[in-house]
Image: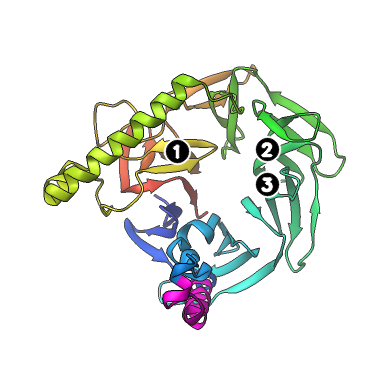
Amino acid sequence: MASKLIFLSDGEMMVLDGGRPRRLDSERKAQYARTVHDLQERNAWKYEGAGAKFQHQVNPYELRSGMLDAVCQIRAAVPWQGKLLYALTTPEMGGLYIKPLEEGDSAESHWLSERGFCPMDLHARGEQAVLALDTALGERHIALMKAGSARYEFVTQGDTQDSAPFLCEDGRTLYYVSAGWARSEDGRAIAKGPSELLRQDLHTGRLEEIAADDNYDYLRPRIAPDGTLYVIRRPYKMDAPRRVGIVDRVKSIGSVFKGLGRLLRFIGDPEGAAKRTPRTAGQTTEAAQQRMFEGMLLDITRSSSGTDEGEGCIPQDWVLLRQAPDGHFEEVLRGAADYDFDGEALIYTDGRRIIRLEDGKKTVLHKAVFIPRLAVCK
């Protein structure tokens, strides 16, 4: 078994070391929280008193402080050169930060941080890192960075969303997934197409389509130690704006009355209402029951099959595939959010659990509220 396993657990960086989970605190996130809190207190006098309340003025920093986890997010965390490399974004800027994995050693450094820098995913190998960066135009492209340099170079382009970069051991072969935008005449994005699996030679620029299907999205490509290509496939659903009709309006009105009814029941019986609220181990009553993941809203309190609360929350039609020698893809397992390899063993998360699959046997290594990402320290 790997000595260390890095994973994200409901917004926090964690390491599973010898079977024991340990949180890896982000100094940058803590610094941002302190700054927002100081600004909130410093500007409180402007928004207190009868005059401010009469004008319905609200301290913007108080709002940001209350939504800290939503506005300051750790987007990705991967092992790199014996340390942890992670990407963090705030409303003002984004950055890449490096911290030790050893317990008790919390000193961290930054690789790059600047305004307009918005890393959403990353993978690192050797002296290079590949990033999925959001742009001001709503596009997302893959960029390449080299150790010792704060500069990055885009290696993909076009009116697309390029995600999930994976850099092979040769340092030149890049796998990623890409989805194109459909836009209106005035340039507004109205729909995103299915994501296809691509391979690119970083030296020659040659681009090759590996898998594409109008009915499916491809996610999270990786190469196993034996050279086999793996990827997650899920059904494609067009997320396009639609007209709100009379039926939708009636449903909205009904939702308002249902919400009012729940509020009145809570006032009359707050303890009973709390007991009826779906709960997950480690989750507070006020915690959100849903998470946005890979462009999809997941109910993390429900199992993927709807039968066993001990199961994961990733839908069963998200299928992990591997490419056979003849080129076709075959099913490995269902309900996977992310995965990596520890020798011949497959380590994956089903959204709630980290599971080791080896010789057909599954072993649960860890459970949490929501585990969207993991990586084995090699």
Residue under numbered circle 2 = 176
Q: Quadrant of residue 349?
A: top left
Residue 336: % across, % down:
44, 34
SS of the residue under disc 3: loop
Give the residue type that dot 3 points to: Glu
For the residues marked 2 and 3, what is the alpha-carbon distance in whole angstroms? 15 Å
**Dot 1 crowding, Cα within 10 Å, few <14, some 14–19, many 20+:** some
Secondary structure character of the magenta stretch overall? helix
- Drawn side of residue 361 relative to residue 327, left or right: left
For the residues marked 1 and 3, what is the alpha-carbon distance in whole angstroms? 19 Å
Question: Is residue 238 something one can see in this rendering?
Answer: yes
The answer to whether mark 2 and mark 3 are in CB contact below 8 A is no
Pick out the residue farthest to the right.
204
Give the residue type that dot 1 points to: Leu
Give the residue type that dot 2 points to: Tyr
SS of the residue under disc 2: strand
Q: Is residue 251 above or below residue 355?
A: above
The answer to whether mark 1 and mark 3 are in CB contact below 8 A is no
Residue 11: % across, % down:
44, 56
Residue 85: % across, % down:
58, 62
| Front residue of this view, candidates 208 and 279 | 279
Mark nearer the N terminus (1 vs 3): 3
- Write down the region rendered in magenta: 30-52
Residue under numbered circle 3 = 169
